[in-house]
């Protein structure tokens, strides 16, 4: 398993416009991507921050998704509305709770 925390800082007041672009390109791309085990699209308490927390089946699935046409189209169209390029932080899940079950991913 592999996780990413992707943070987007929009230019002032552009968060809703960026979300509209996300809905146009990314919603279907995420829904169709079998490598995604979890995808949570979030607004931060800062009015210009969007964060996407994602869990993938593997690191290769994560890297492949970031190369998809949907993600490329999203970046191209939202680029002028972002204050900076997305901050992409890889994470290594140690344990998760999903569907009511707590699962250790590594030996304690």
Image (tube, rainbow, N blue to C red):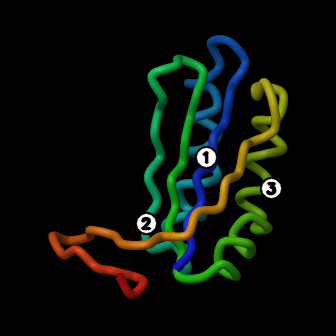
Closer to the eye: label 1 or 3: 3
- Relative to 12, say whether 59 is above or below: below
Q: Describe the element under mark 3 as helix, strand or loop.
A: helix
Residue carrying label 2: 38
SS state under label 1:
helix
Q: CA distance from mark 2 to mark 3?
A: 20 Å
Compare marks 1 and 3 and give the one earlier in the sequence: 1
- The quarter holding residue 87 reads top right
Q: Quadrant of the C terminus?
A: bottom left
The mark found on residue 107 in the picture is none
Instruction: Indicate which disc residue 72 carries.
Output: 3
- Residue 86, x across and y down, in percent: 74, 42
Circle 3 residues within 10 Å: few <14, some 14–19, many ≥20: some
Q: Earlier in the sequence, mark 1 or mark 2?
A: 1
Identity of the residue furthest to the left in this view? 100
Q: What residue is at 48 percent from the left and 29 percent from the top?
A: 44
Residue 88, position as x, y percentages in the image: 70, 51
At label 2, counting other C-alpha atoms closer than 10 Å, the crowd grade (few under 14, some 14-19, many 20 or more) is: few
Residue 64: x percent and y percent?
A: 73, 75
**Residue 30 vertical placement versus 63 (above, below):** above
Q: Secondary structure at mark 2?
A: strand
Please give the name of the residue rendered at 38% of the width and 87% of the height, measured from the top-left corner: 107
Q: CA distance from mark 1 to mark 2?
A: 19 Å
Q: Looking at the image, is 44 positioned above or below residue 108?
A: above
In 3D space, how far apart are the residues under numbered discs 1 and 3 (Cα atoms)? 12 Å
Residue 8 at x, y = what percent?
66, 36
| Left or right of 68, for residue 46 | left
Which residue in the protein does label 1 denote?
24
């Amino acid at each position: 398993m592999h996780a990413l925390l992707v943070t987007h800082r929009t230019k002032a007041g552009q968060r809703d416009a960026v979300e509209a672009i996300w809905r146009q390109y990314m919603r279907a791309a995420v829904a169709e991507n079998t490598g995604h085990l979890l995808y949570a699209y979030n607004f931060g308490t800062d009015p210009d921050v969007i964060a996407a927390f994602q869990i993938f089946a593997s690191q290769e699935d994560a890297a492949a998704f970031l190369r998809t046409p949907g993600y490329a189209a999203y970046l191209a169209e939202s680029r002028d509305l972002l204050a900076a390029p997305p901050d992409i932080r890889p994470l290594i899940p140690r344990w998760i709770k999903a569907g009511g079950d707590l699962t250790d991913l590594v030996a304690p």
